[in-house]
Image (spheres, rainbow, N blue to C red):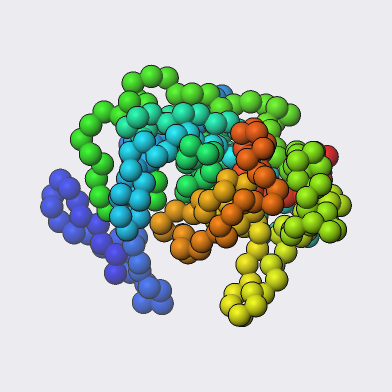
């Protein structure tokens, strides 16, 4: 039986009682005042949203000393390009929306295209991604923020005013045709042909880097097993330049971080066969961006161009 409480008399009155039916959460169909709606900042007229972070140094890492203040130099913001039906790959294609400096206190605030899948990468002094987030987005005119970088969601932020909140958000809202990509065919091959291929040809030091597409495939393939056995290891780890042996070779050191499984691997001592020190900083940055963005052969083909 469903009953209704009369707010005036205080008596309960039967409203519905049918032994053939169950009465569950009955509602009176009668005139009433329209209830308040849920407020929303979303406005379709604004094509952009805002993403902000209070402190990228607040994280879920086992030791905070692994990323001390000052380690994070910049923020790279990537747009995810949807794959077509039937396409496969370890990572979806990405375009660079922009790259900005991070404030001294670890904060940032950016405007991005609304309703667009976005990935954030915090970068070290060499431009390598230290940590990346999963795909996020902001609705039209929506301010969406986080406390830190993979922070504990159960904790409240520190009671301080973030530096990035004291100035307008940095717009990263270039039209699609001006959003930069980095791929092997267009950006990496010219550097390899100029600087690397003479020493990494058929008779040179491994990996063999002549041959365009074949060179890309060799870098992404599994390395040969070590003489004493052990696991097979690639030259390039798509999406993670800092753990890629190919990148270590360019910088002359293991660029892994303490939380990476590859942190304990030692490089062979002695001069590198390709004299990677002759590479310009821009050339090295191109290699790093190529790996951090997924190590694709041809982004134009991935975008259907």
Q: Nearer the viewer, residue 47 or 296?
A: 296
Tell me the quadrant of the picture where the N terminus can be found. Answer: bottom left
Q: Nearer the viewer, residue 22 or 99?
A: 99
The residue shown at (32%, 58%) is: 62
Q: Is residue 281 visible?
A: yes
Q: Residue furthest front?
A: 270
Q: Quadrant of residue 279?
A: top right
Q: Is residue 148 visible?
A: no
The residue shown at (26%, 28%) is: 161
Where is 36 relative to 132, above or below? above
Q: Nearer the viewer, residue 214 or 176?
A: 214
- In the rendered image, residue 20, in percent from the top left (x then y), is placed at 41, 77
Does 42 sit left or right of 217 as displayed? left
Tell me the quadrant of the picture where the C terminus can be found. Answer: top right
Does 201 sit left or right of 14 as displayed? right
Q: Residue furthest top?
A: 167
The residue shown at (33%, 43%) is: 68
Q: Quadrant of residue 79?
A: top right
């Amino acid at each position: 039986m469903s009953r209704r409480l009369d707010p005036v008399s205080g008596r309960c009155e039967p409203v519905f009682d049918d032994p053939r039916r169950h009465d569950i959460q009955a509602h009176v169909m009668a005139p009433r005042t329209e209830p308040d709606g849920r407020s929303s900042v979303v406005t379709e007229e604004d094509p952009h949203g805002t993403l902000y972070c209070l402190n990228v140094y607040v994280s879920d890492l086992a030791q905070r000393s692994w990323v001390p203040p000052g380690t994070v130099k910049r923020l790279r913001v990537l747009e995810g390009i949807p794959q077509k039906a039937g396409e496969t790959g370890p990572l979806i294609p990405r375009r660079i929306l922009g790259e900005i400096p991070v404030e001294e206190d670890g904060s940032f605030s950016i405007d991005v295209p609304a309703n667009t899948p976005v990935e954030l990468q915090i970068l070290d002094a060499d431009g390598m991604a230290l940590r990346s987030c999963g795909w996020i987005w902001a609705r039209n005119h929506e301010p969406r923020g986080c406390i830190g970088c993979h922070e504990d969601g159960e904790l409240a932020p520190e009671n301080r005013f973030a530096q990035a909140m004291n100035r307008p958000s940095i717009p990263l809202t270039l039209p699609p045709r001006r959003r930069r990509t980095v791929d092997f065919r267009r950006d990496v091959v010219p550097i390899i042909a100029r600087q690397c291929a003479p020493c990494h040809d058929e008779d040179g030091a491994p990996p063999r880097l002549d041959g365009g597409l074949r060179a890309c495939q060799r870098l992404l393939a599994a390395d040969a097993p070590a003489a004493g056995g052990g696991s097979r290891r690639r030259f390039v780890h798509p999406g993670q330049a800092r753990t890629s042996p190919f990148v270590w070779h360019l910088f002359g050191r293991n660029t892994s971080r303490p939380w990476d499984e590859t942190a304990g691997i030692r490089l062979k001592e002695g001069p590198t066969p390709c004299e990677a020190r002759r590479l310009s900083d821009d050339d090295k940055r191109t290699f790093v961006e190529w790996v951090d963005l997924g190590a694709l052969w041809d982004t134009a083909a991935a975008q259907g161009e």
